[in-house]
Amino acid sequence: MTVHLRGHSTVVERSGDGALDHLRTMIRALPVPTAPLSFPSRDAALGLALMDLSFRLDHLPRLSEHLTLMDRGHMSRTISVDVDLDEISGRLGETLLVPGGTALWVPVSRYSRRDLAPVVIRDSNGDVVPRLSHRDANRVTAAAFVKLLFMLINAHDDVADPTGPIHQLRHTHQRSRWLIEAAITELIMVGAPAGQRLHTPLDHAAGLRNSHSVRDLALDGLDALFPVGADDQAVPFARLLQLAVRQYVLVAQLGRDRPRRFLTWEAPLLPAQHRPAPLRNLAKNVLPVNREFVVEYETEIPRSVKAYHLTLEVRQEISVRRFVMSSNVDEEFVEVLAQDLESVARRADRLGGHHKLLELEMQGIASRLAELGHRRLVDLAGYEAYLARLPIPVGPESAPPPARLTADEVLTALSAGNCSLDVLAAFCAHYAADGLQHLAKSGLPGPALRNIAAGLRAAQAGRDITTDNDPREHGAHAHWRRPPVELSPQSTEPVRVFAFMALADEAPALIESITRMVAGLALVVLGIGTLLSGGISWLYSPAIPEGFVPDQADAVVAVLLLVPGLLLARLDLPSTKSVLGQLHKFQRTLAAASVVVTTALAIVVGTVDSDREMTRLFQLALGVLIVILICCLCEFYARRIHRSCPVPRSSRVPRWLRDARRSTRPVVEPDDFFDARGEG
Amino acid sequence: MTQPMNSTKSSELARIAAEAAGTHFSSVEFTLTHGPADAPLPESIVDPDKEDPNGWPTDFCYFSAAGLSMSMSTWPSVMSAFSGRVQIGPAEQTGHGDTYSYFGHAVPNPGFLNQSTRKVEVLITLGTAHWSPTYREALMQALVIEKLTALAAERDAPVLHLHTPVAPVPLSIKSERGDGSNERLRDAIAPCLRFSIGVDPQMSESRLDFETELAALAEEYGFGLKLNDQRFNRVRGEWFTIRGFDRERYRQARNQLFPAAPASIPKRAVIASVIGPSRTGTTAAAVAALRERGIGVLAASISSMRKTTFINLVLPVTAEVKETPPQWSGGWLDALPRLSACAGHQLEVADQPLIADWKVAVSPAMRCSYPPSSRQTGATFTGKVPYPIWLWWQLPHRTVDTPTLLAEVQAALQPHARRCDIAYAQSRLCRGDVVRGRAKLVVVLSQEHRDHTVVQRLLADATEAAQLRIRERLPALGQVDPSKIRLRLSPRERWLTYADISA
């Protein structure tokens, strides 16, 4: 089971569980083969083609995900893709050809090996599309890696050096190469989930011979191919192997006669990753805070996807109060920009000798900063429009007027590390108006650049925002489009998408019914007390009215038991497992408490015959009911605060958006977090 | 923070491997032709009757300078077992008397990943006069190439391309319009060198160091230095001047370094093509070995195709050497004595282990010719000035091959031009099964005009008319869907880029 640490964007790798470490362990553990593993060259070609296509998935122009919150803790996903077979180049197409037909094997997705639920792919007619079995996919992947290793050995610089391990692996000591190949095959066939040390029989044996020439040469060869010391993640082969042992490829068989297809399938059910925060949960459940149920969802989409739709559907009783999606599509661009800024800052003195070179660097940086400002401003405008069209307005004070800055003010603000949207947008305007032509002479080169880099990272300027455009209250839809100009054009790094959803109980809400019920019960208690004492003086006067104990106690008891029972029966209280149950937890407690009060009062009426005690207990019951009523009113107030919150209080919402809306409140953890990234 | 290049690099590795290991292919086959510049372009080997889909070359490259030309094309090959990394031998004569063809195989190097790199393009000015290099200048040029490529090699940055001579860039004047419509027309060829290297975007420090040292080098030798404009939304062909050309310092440096080299213009030259698996530092090693033996470089064209590097050098033959050996191909270490013989020296210099396994194809000595005129030499008065025209195209693979397309372009420009030569052309098979290419043509207009604006209008009209004609002809030529043809001819390089293709 993978442990995703929040705040970190990668799976935290423990030392010793990289793919190459696993490979080394496997080399030590496997018996030395005496004959080569032979894979047909067709398998290797197919495996390499599948691997290539499955990483880029550039034949999928559109991707849609439909999320349904089953209950608290489980989410079902329906994935639909548009496939365009014309995007697959001719030579790859020939390799992918299913023998004896015109159909192609086409990878459509990658999955974590943990999710081994059956997947049924259907096309637009509802017909089931044949799939490549998991075992076959693993076999061709293993063949692909064996071939890739052979190609890397063949093309290595030292292959011609007869004393080097590479030459020996290639020509003279083939058993060592077979051993590496066997280890790769074993690793891919069995798989090795993230975060685990590979468990091999070696762990159970003692007194083993440490040195074996075939094994040693295999390990030396591996070190020569992929030098030790380099970060495991930085070696492309290691990264490929890591993905291959952690994921499997979903491959569908599609006919070439219809190059444009629509496929849909139910992805394996996604469990929530619960993070126990008992105190916070308790506070949410016992305080009148009108709790929202916050769900966060994270997934990865291929960078080449042109459009991505994320839709959410919940029960009709639940309203989607906020739905915001954020992707890190420009994060790589920002990181490269920040590194450029830091490098220029470190070298400002050396570059200063070549004035024009420094100017070129500064202009390059300025143009990218300006583009970034432009993009985020477009995002912000979209977000403002979203807030404006919400059914319940966020509040008039929500849009602070933008500060207008001169070129000098912008440079001063930037130098101080202020990369807020106001500053970036003003910078963009000044850059577009050619107002920043001589940056090398400005005070910017130097430590100020480091501040800008830090400011950009802190503001999370590489994340964009897409908002909900579904008019329904119990559904949401966000449509992400790939930016028209890709800022990191060569990258094939998948785009990470975060979605924030706040689910709430909006009017007509349960709390309104409960408030009415509690008010009703308070009136009943007040009425009975008033009728028994013959006036309302019992409410405030210290004097004990005569004859408070009713003559016909049974009738009063009946009223006190029947009325709350009838009112409670009218309320539709949900089960505690559901999301609605979670939303209503406190309100259900209020309803129960008011019934407990009246029931207790009924018992009192039936058993107590002292006027004094009866009066005091009536006063107490009324007091408790009023407290409950105040709690109900607090819930209304809390709901209002939640509704008027302009920016979701989530760490996944980019910092620049929170800053732009002057949101200073601390972020809170979501109630449920679903991680659909396949790297587990 | 993730290491953003991880997946990019690994998916690039997967792509290279998948392309290299198609069902039937395991190596790259290539042909190489040396010949005079006026020889027809090498004919396509595709036999339309056979319809062999793999008969279409994936990459093509052509370069001509000093009256000599070299062209290369590659395609996938079934051959898998041969000794070493590259194999080369003379091909059967194609019928043209003066052309020399070679044929070979190379193992692609999947470890050479450069798709994800950021390109830094450099334009070096080695003179402002018209291009007629002497032996001394050839040596100086060799030195400059060696120094520049060594700077890149120190930082493990691959040289993506290098060409000399190329079109110079006129100094821009502030009052000019930003779209370049009023800028001075460029010369077709000048003593300039253009090269690009790929730098990992994550390693901005090495890029900055490279640029700083480049500027220091320019200061030392006095050559002019321009870098590609790295601003966002700037395209290829837009330059940022770092240093102007310092004639006096350049002359001093040249005369000091090579006092003995003759200041005459070479009459004959050999073409040497050094071929091997792509690695960093190879160009520097090859040119350094030649320069140590007293061989200069008259013209050069270096490019990588399918992870195999082709270093094509035009080497001047000393006037004293009357007889040069015939067409030859073989290993790099065997080639060095032969090349030294052309230069009239027999120096014993240590070998270069880096490219010891590379192969060389050497043509016999051929007669050089130099462009008779340029704007700077005052030829404007005759009006017979060669102007550059740039071409960019994208066509579906296996429809029209590059030599046919280039011949078509030449034919389409014929009504407007007295002469139309191809200075440079390169096409590659890209993702999505399309062939993308760029070319530079040199035209001498049939109408003689001295007036700048009139010439500009004539060029614009000629390119537009030719563009239309080619678009009409291409569908008939290769049964290609007209909607998939994209082609643009322009007298300005930076106008080539289509809106949806970012630089």
Image: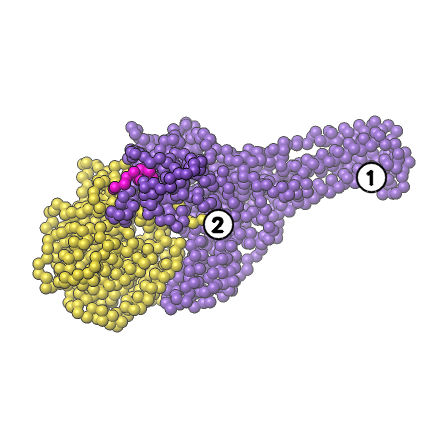
Chain colours: A purple, B yellow
Q: In which quadrant of the rendered view does residue B209 lie?
A: bottom left
Residue at position x 53%, y 61% in the image: A404
Depth check: B191 or A217 in front? A217
The residue depicted at 86 percent of the width and 34 percent of the height is A532
Whole-percent x, y for residue A445 in the image = 44, 65
Q: Can residue A198 be seen in this view?
A: yes
Q: Identify the element where label 1 is drawn.
A: helix
State left or right for residue A346 relative to residue B92: right
Disc 1 from disc 2: Cα separation: 58 Å
Residue at 30%, 34% in the rendered image: A34
The part of the image, by quadrant, that contains residue A631 is top right
The crowd level at tag 1 (other Cα within 10 Å; few <14, some 14-19, many 20+) is some
Residue B402 image point, x, y percent: 23, 47
Q: Which amino acid does label 1 sit on?
A: Gln
Q: Name the residue under label 1.
A: A619
Q: Position of residue B16 (x, y in %)?
A: 31, 44
Outermost residue toward the left in this view: B323
- Residue farthest along the front direction in this orientation: A207
Tell me which amino acid carries mark 2.
Arg
The segment highlighted magenta reads A171-181
Q: What element carries label 2?
A: loop
Q: Does the magenta stretch include residue A341?
A: no
Quickly name the residue at label 2.
A463
